[in-house]
Amino acid sequence: MRATSPAAPRLATWIATWFGCGLSPKAPGTVGSIGAVPLHLLLSQLPWPAHALAVVVVALGGIWASQVYASARGEKDPQTVVIDEVAGTVIAMGVVRGAPWFVQLAGLIAFRVFDIWKPGPIRRVERVQPVGAGIMCDDLVAGVFAAVLVWGGWRLLGG
Protein backbone atom coordinates (compact mmCIF):
# COMPACT_ATOMS: atom_id res chain seq x y z
CA MET A 1 0.00 0.00 0.00
CA ARG A 2 1.47 3.37 -0.95
CA ALA A 3 1.18 6.59 0.96
CA THR A 4 -1.42 8.83 -0.65
CA SER A 5 -0.18 12.18 0.61
CA PRO A 6 3.07 13.76 1.77
CA ALA A 7 1.83 13.56 5.39
CA ALA A 8 1.12 9.82 5.21
CA PRO A 9 4.67 8.56 5.93
CA ARG A 10 4.99 10.81 9.00
CA LEU A 11 1.53 9.87 10.22
CA ALA A 12 2.25 6.20 9.53
CA THR A 13 5.49 6.49 11.52
CA TRP A 14 3.75 8.04 14.53
CA ILE A 15 1.03 5.40 14.50
CA ALA A 16 3.30 2.43 13.74
CA THR A 17 5.78 3.37 16.48
CA TRP A 18 2.97 4.48 18.82
CA PHE A 19 4.28 8.01 19.19
CA GLY A 20 7.88 6.85 19.45
CA CYS A 21 7.49 3.97 21.94
CA GLY A 22 8.80 1.57 19.31
CA LEU A 23 12.03 3.55 19.04
CA SER A 24 13.10 2.34 22.49
CA PRO A 25 16.52 0.68 22.22
CA LYS A 26 15.49 -2.01 24.73
CA ALA A 27 12.30 -4.11 24.57
CA PRO A 28 10.33 -1.91 22.14
CA GLY A 29 7.36 -4.33 22.20
CA THR A 30 7.08 -4.11 25.97
CA VAL A 31 7.49 -0.34 25.85
CA GLY A 32 4.71 -0.24 23.24
CA SER A 33 2.44 -2.32 25.48
CA ILE A 34 3.14 -0.03 28.42
CA GLY A 35 2.50 2.92 26.11
CA ALA A 36 -0.97 1.45 25.43
CA VAL A 37 -1.99 1.65 29.10
CA PRO A 38 -3.14 5.31 28.91
CA LEU A 39 -5.31 4.39 25.90
CA HIS A 40 -6.73 1.46 27.87
CA LEU A 41 -7.50 3.72 30.84
CA LEU A 42 -9.25 6.20 28.57
CA LEU A 43 -11.25 3.50 26.77
CA SER A 44 -12.25 1.84 30.04
CA GLN A 45 -14.23 5.00 30.84
CA LEU A 46 -16.34 4.56 27.71
CA PRO A 47 -19.23 2.15 27.16
CA TRP A 48 -18.10 -1.31 26.02
CA PRO A 49 -19.30 -0.87 22.38
CA ALA A 50 -17.20 2.28 22.04
CA HIS A 51 -14.20 0.44 23.47
CA ALA A 52 -14.69 -2.40 20.97
CA LEU A 53 -15.04 0.08 18.09
CA ALA A 54 -11.82 1.78 19.17
CA VAL A 55 -10.02 -1.58 19.04
CA VAL A 56 -11.26 -2.05 15.47
CA VAL A 57 -10.09 1.46 14.53
CA VAL A 58 -6.66 0.84 16.10
CA ALA A 59 -6.39 -2.50 14.28
CA LEU A 60 -7.35 -1.07 10.88
CA GLY A 61 -5.19 2.02 11.35
CA GLY A 62 -2.39 -0.26 12.50
CA ILE A 63 -2.61 -2.40 9.38
CA TRP A 64 -2.32 0.70 7.20
CA ALA A 65 0.47 2.31 9.25
CA SER A 66 2.44 -0.93 9.56
CA GLN A 67 2.22 -1.52 5.82
CA VAL A 68 3.33 2.00 4.90
CA TYR A 69 6.09 2.07 7.52
CA ALA A 70 7.46 -1.41 6.72
CA SER A 71 7.39 -0.69 2.98
CA ALA A 72 9.19 2.64 3.45
CA ARG A 73 11.90 0.91 5.51
CA GLY A 74 12.11 -2.08 3.20
CA GLU A 75 11.58 -4.47 6.13
CA LYS A 76 9.05 -7.25 6.55
CA ASP A 77 8.33 -6.71 10.27
CA PRO A 78 10.36 -3.86 11.79
CA GLN A 79 10.85 -4.17 15.56
CA THR A 80 10.06 -0.48 15.86
CA VAL A 81 6.44 -1.16 14.82
CA VAL A 82 4.52 -1.48 18.09
CA ILE A 83 0.96 -0.51 17.10
CA ASP A 84 0.32 -4.25 17.02
CA GLU A 85 1.32 -4.47 20.71
CA VAL A 86 -0.99 -1.54 21.43
CA ALA A 87 -3.94 -3.34 19.85
CA GLY A 88 -3.19 -6.63 21.61
CA THR A 89 -2.76 -4.91 24.97
CA VAL A 90 -6.02 -2.99 24.62
CA ILE A 91 -7.83 -6.25 23.84
CA ALA A 92 -6.25 -8.19 26.72
CA MET A 93 -6.78 -5.45 29.28
CA GLY A 94 -10.12 -4.35 27.89
CA VAL A 95 -11.89 -7.65 28.43
CA VAL A 96 -11.19 -7.34 32.18
CA ARG A 97 -11.56 -3.57 32.35
CA GLY A 98 -14.03 -3.77 35.23
CA ALA A 99 -11.70 -5.96 37.27
CA PRO A 100 -9.22 -4.74 39.90
CA TRP A 101 -6.03 -3.14 38.57
CA PHE A 102 -3.92 -6.25 39.20
CA VAL A 103 -6.23 -8.37 37.01
CA GLN A 104 -5.91 -5.80 34.23
CA LEU A 105 -2.13 -5.86 34.71
CA ALA A 106 -2.30 -9.65 34.40
CA GLY A 107 -3.95 -9.07 31.01
CA LEU A 108 -0.97 -7.01 29.87
CA ILE A 109 1.50 -9.58 31.17
CA ALA A 110 -0.39 -12.50 29.62
CA PHE A 111 -0.47 -10.64 26.32
CA ARG A 112 3.31 -10.12 26.38
CA VAL A 113 3.84 -13.82 27.16
CA PHE A 114 1.64 -14.92 24.24
CA ASP A 115 3.20 -12.30 21.95
CA ILE A 116 6.73 -13.48 22.70
CA TRP A 117 5.96 -17.22 22.89
CA LYS A 118 3.66 -17.27 19.82
CA PRO A 119 2.07 -20.71 20.27
CA GLY A 120 0.56 -22.45 17.19
CA PRO A 121 -2.22 -20.28 15.76
CA ILE A 122 -0.50 -17.05 16.76
CA ARG A 123 2.63 -17.93 14.79
CA ARG A 124 0.57 -19.03 11.77
CA VAL A 125 -1.38 -15.77 11.41
CA GLU A 126 1.90 -13.85 11.47
CA ARG A 127 2.27 -14.88 7.80
CA VAL A 128 -1.00 -13.26 6.67
CA GLN A 129 -0.59 -10.94 3.67
CA PRO A 130 -0.28 -8.07 3.04
CA VAL A 131 2.62 -7.42 5.42
CA GLY A 132 0.70 -4.84 7.47
CA ALA A 133 -2.03 -7.36 8.21
CA GLY A 134 0.53 -10.01 9.17
CA ILE A 135 2.24 -7.57 11.54
CA MET A 136 -1.07 -6.88 13.26
CA CYS A 137 -2.81 -10.27 13.18
CA ASP A 138 -0.50 -12.24 15.47
CA ASP A 139 -0.83 -9.61 18.19
CA LEU A 140 -4.59 -9.40 17.79
CA VAL A 141 -4.82 -13.17 18.27
CA ALA A 142 -2.34 -13.01 21.19
CA GLY A 143 -4.55 -10.31 22.74
CA VAL A 144 -7.61 -12.53 22.42
CA PHE A 145 -5.76 -15.53 23.92
CA ALA A 146 -4.57 -13.40 26.84
CA ALA A 147 -8.05 -11.94 27.34
CA VAL A 148 -9.67 -15.38 27.46
CA LEU A 149 -7.04 -16.70 29.87
CA VAL A 150 -7.16 -13.77 32.27
CA TRP A 151 -10.95 -13.36 32.13
CA GLY A 152 -11.40 -17.10 32.75
CA GLY A 153 -8.94 -17.07 35.62
CA TRP A 154 -10.58 -14.04 37.18
CA ARG A 155 -14.02 -15.68 36.92
CA LEU A 156 -12.78 -18.96 38.37
CA LEU A 157 -11.35 -17.05 41.33
CA GLY A 158 -14.72 -15.41 41.98
CA GLY A 159 -14.43 -12.19 40.01
Image (tube, helix red, strand yellow):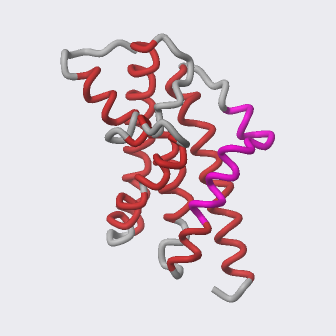
* Quadrant location, the C terminus: bottom right
Report the number of discs: 0
Q: Is residue 127 magenta-colored?
A: no
Rendering quarter of residue 36:
bottom left
Instruction: Tell me what residue is drawn at x 29 percent, y 20 percent.
Output: 9
Instruction: From the top left corner, tell me how far across and down residue 142 is, in percent.
Output: 65, 48
Q: Position of residue 88 (x, y in %)?
A: 54, 49
Considering every residue shown, the one lying at the far left of the view is 6
111, above or below 74, in the image: below
Which residue occupies the extreme right position in the image?
A: 120
Q: Vertical placement of 57 versus 39: above or below? A: above
Residue at image point 48% right, 78% down: 98
Seen as rendered, the residue at the extreme bottom is: 158
Please give the name of the residue rendered at 44% of the width and 27% of the height, measured from the top-left corner. 66
Q: Is residue 131 left or right of residue 154?
A: left
Q: In the rendered structure, which segment of residues is drawn in magenta?
A: 107-125
Residue 19 picture location, percent across and down: 32, 41
Q: Which residue is drawn at 72% across and 85% down?
A: 157
The image quadrant of residue 131 is: top right
> Considering depth in this image, is 140 or 104 the residue closer to the camera?
104
| Left or right: residue 131 compared with residue 44 | right
Q: In which quarter of the image is the N terminus?
A: top left
148 and 68: which is toward the camera = 68
Whether residue 112 is in magenta: the answer is: yes
Q: Main secondary structure of the magenta part?
A: helix
Q: Position of residue 143 (x, y in %)?
A: 60, 52
